[in-house]
Image (cartoon, grey):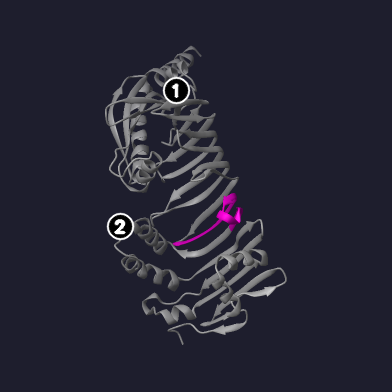
């Protein structure tokens, strides 16, 4: 009995006293793998390690995160009202890692735990400007590395404010949890942000009550699939007349792979969207795709992401045409159940259905593609809205005179269909130039 008790004490001593040094190396490797994965996911972001001071029970390290290229850098510069040649500040992440199968030293800090794992970490953030000045950022990141290498990071932010160079940033209590798994490059996330606002001498930008949740996993075609849901109570943006407030905003999207084919659905609702003299509008979109070729979607997405680098639309189309042909030849279904715009004068409603039956891509021709394509397009426009539109542009009356729009009570309607190479609009056949 005593021998068993002594053996148990020895095992506990090994777990508590010896494992931290061994597991510390594993935890460091796991965290570096997650950082490498994060950098690989965004080619615009560069993550550099500034060293790792490993101790027996705890370690400390620093990483520099730079946004060097791409749309993200351009967006951040635009928000900061800086020119394209300006430098963005570098994000500095300072991390303390408590390691060991039982991370005893983590109990001396917030969010500490004796839950078994490869380690628990606390990270603080700061910005380093090009003149060497460093500004501490609010909030703390608490991370856990599981025994399987999964990294869960929770960013916790308490309400506060920060002022610099005539601008003031205000924020409410916020919490974001991100879990990454290097084994399959998947990421799960959920978060809630009470408020974020930026006030300057000539503008006011605010975001109220953002909530998001989702799960994403990359595919071999260069895009990710999974679920994302998001809601925003309101967004306030500056305009020439002052400010405009948009919201609430709701988004739900889901996508999945079946072999090499992708299917998905997106629902989005935006309220109080400014529509000029027509007043605020509510927009609702409900769209579904089914069995689209993943390789074609991936290549088309890459070309569109780099569209500004092409000299002309014709040049961009040159790089798109093979994949557009592949997409049509492989077949797919597209349904836009709702594309609705609700205005004070009434609701404009649109429905679109497209299906391609597919054929041998090696024998592609545009006549063959059109024969394999079935589509319908239904449009309903309130008469009151048509009256406003024709007053602004009398040429719109031509659509009524030619039979494209037909009045039915308080609405104007269009019912267009394309089937077996024949286009009809409101029941009347319409010739397609160049296609017999």
Crowding around mark 2 (Cα neighbors within 10 Å: few <14, some 14 to 19, many 20+) is few
Residue 201 visible in image: yes
Helix, strand or loop at label 1? It is loop
Residue farthest along the top direction in this orientation:
2
Give me the residue at 33% from left, 25% from top. 134
The dot on residue 102 is 1
Crowding around mark 1 (Cα neighbors within 10 Å: few <14, some 14 to 19, many 20+) is many
The spot of residue 323 in percent (x, y) is: 38, 67
Quarter where residue 412 is shown:
bottom right
Give me the residue at 61% from left, 70% from top. 378
Instruction: Identify the main secondary structure in magenta.
Output: strand
The dot on residue 185 is none
Is 188 situated above or below 420? above
Precedes in sequence: disc 1 or disc 2: 1
Is 283 situated above or below 327? above
Front residue of 333/180: it is 333
Residue 403 visible in image: no
Q: How many marks?
A: 2
Residue at mark 2: 309
The spot of residue 424 in percent (x, y) is: 57, 81
Front residue of 81/222: it is 81
Quarter where residue 310 is shown:
bottom left
The magenta stretch is 260-285
């Amino acid at each position: 009995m005593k021998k068993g008790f002594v053996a148990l004490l020895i095992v506990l001593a090994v777990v508590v006293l010896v494992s931290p040094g061994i597991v510390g190396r594993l935890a460091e490797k796991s965290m570096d793998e997650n950082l490498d994965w994060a950098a690989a996911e965004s080619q615009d972001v560069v993550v550099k390690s500034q060293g790792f001071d490993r101790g027996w029970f705890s370690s400390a390290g620093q990483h520099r995160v730079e946004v060097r290229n791409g749309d993200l850098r351009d967006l951040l510069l635009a928000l900061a009202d800086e020119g394209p040649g300006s430098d963005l500040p570098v994000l500095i992440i300072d991390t303390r890692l408590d390691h060991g199968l039982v991370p005893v030293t983590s109990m001396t800090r917030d969010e500490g735990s004796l839950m078994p794992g490869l380690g628990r970490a606390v990270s603080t953030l700061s910005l380093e400007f090009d003149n060497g000045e460093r500004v501490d950022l609010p909030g703390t990141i608490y991370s856990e590395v599981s025994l399987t290498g999964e990294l869960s990071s929770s960013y916790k932010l308490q309400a506060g404010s920060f002022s610099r160079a005539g601008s003031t940033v205000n924020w409410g209590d916020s919490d974001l949890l991100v879990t990454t798994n290097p084994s399959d490059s998947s990421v799960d996330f959920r978060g809630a942000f009470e408020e974020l606002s930026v006030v300057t001498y000539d503008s006011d930008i605010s975001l109220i009550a953002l909530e998001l949740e989702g799960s994403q996993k990359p595919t071999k075609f260069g895009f990710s699939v999974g679920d994302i849901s998001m809601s925003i109570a309101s967004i306030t943006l500056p305009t020439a007349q002052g400010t405009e407030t948009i919201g609430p905003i709701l988004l739900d999207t889901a996508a999945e792979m079946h072999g090499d084919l992708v299917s998905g659905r997106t629902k989005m609702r935006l309220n109080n969207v400014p529509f000029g003299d027509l007043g605020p509008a509510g927009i609702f979109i409900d769209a579904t795709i089914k069995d689209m070729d993943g390789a074609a979607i991936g290549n088309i997405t890459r070309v569109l992401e780099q569209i500004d680098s092409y000299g002309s639309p014709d040049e961009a189309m040159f790089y798109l045409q093979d994949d557009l042909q592949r997409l049509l030849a492989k077949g797919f279904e597209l349904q836009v159940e709702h594309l609705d715009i609700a205005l004070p004068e009434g609701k404009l409603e649109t429905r679109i259905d497209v299906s391609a039956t597919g054929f041998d891509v090696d024998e592609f021709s545009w006549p063959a593609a059109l024969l394999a394509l079935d589509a319908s397009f239904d449009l309903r426009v309130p008469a009151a809205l048509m009256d406003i539109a024709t007053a602004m542009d009398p040429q719109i009356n031509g659509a009524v005179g030619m039979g494209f729009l037909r009045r039915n009570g308080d609405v104007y309607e269009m019912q267009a269909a394309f089937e077996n190479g024949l286009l009809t609009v409101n029941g009347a056949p319409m010739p397609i130039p160049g296609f017999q």
